[in-house]
Image: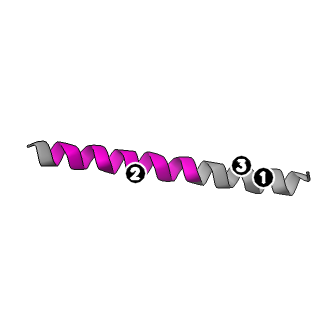
Amino acid sequence: MSLDKLTIHSLVIQQLIIDVLFQLYFVDEGLKYSLN
């Protein structure tokens, strides 16, 4: 496995984590608004 593939792999994982965090954040905000 080359360094380039590892770098791309970690970038993809980082992007996925950011996407999941954003989704969780927006779901949390949405729940707060719907509860009010």
Q: What's drawn in magenta, residue-wise?
A: 16-33
Question: Of helix, strand and loop, which mostly describes the magenta segment?
Answer: helix
For label 3, the crowd category at 10 Å Cα-Cα, with few meaning under 14, some 14 to 19 and many 20 or more, is few
Disc 2 target residue: 23
Q: Is residue 26 left or right of residue 20?
A: left
Left or right of 20 on screen, residue 11: right
Q: Earlier in the sequence, mark 2 or mark 1?
A: 1
N-term-proximal mark, 2 vs 3: 3
| Labelled disc at residue 24 | none
Disc number for residue 7: 1
- What kind of residue is marked 3? Ser
The type of residue carrying mark 2 is Gln
* Residue at the spot 91% in from the left edge and 51% down from the top edge: 1
Instruction: Check contact, mark 2 vs mark 1: CB within 8 A.
Output: no
Question: As drawn, is 35 to the left or to the right of 29?
Answer: left
Q: Mark 1, residues whose alpha carbon is within 10 Å: few (<14), some, or many (≥20)?
A: few
Is label 2 in contact with label 3 (beta carbons under 8 Å)? no
Q: What residue lies at 25% left-to-right and 46% top-to-bottom?
A: 29
How far apart, in angstroms, are the residues tagged by discs 2 and 1? 24 Å
Mark 3 — residue? 10
- Position of the C terminus, as image quadrant, is top left
Q: Kindly indicate whether the residue at mark 3 contacts the one at mark 1 (C-beta within 8 angstroms).
A: yes
Residue 5, magenta (yes or no): no
Looking at the image, which residue is at 28% across and 43% down?
28
Q: How is the image coloured?
A: one colour
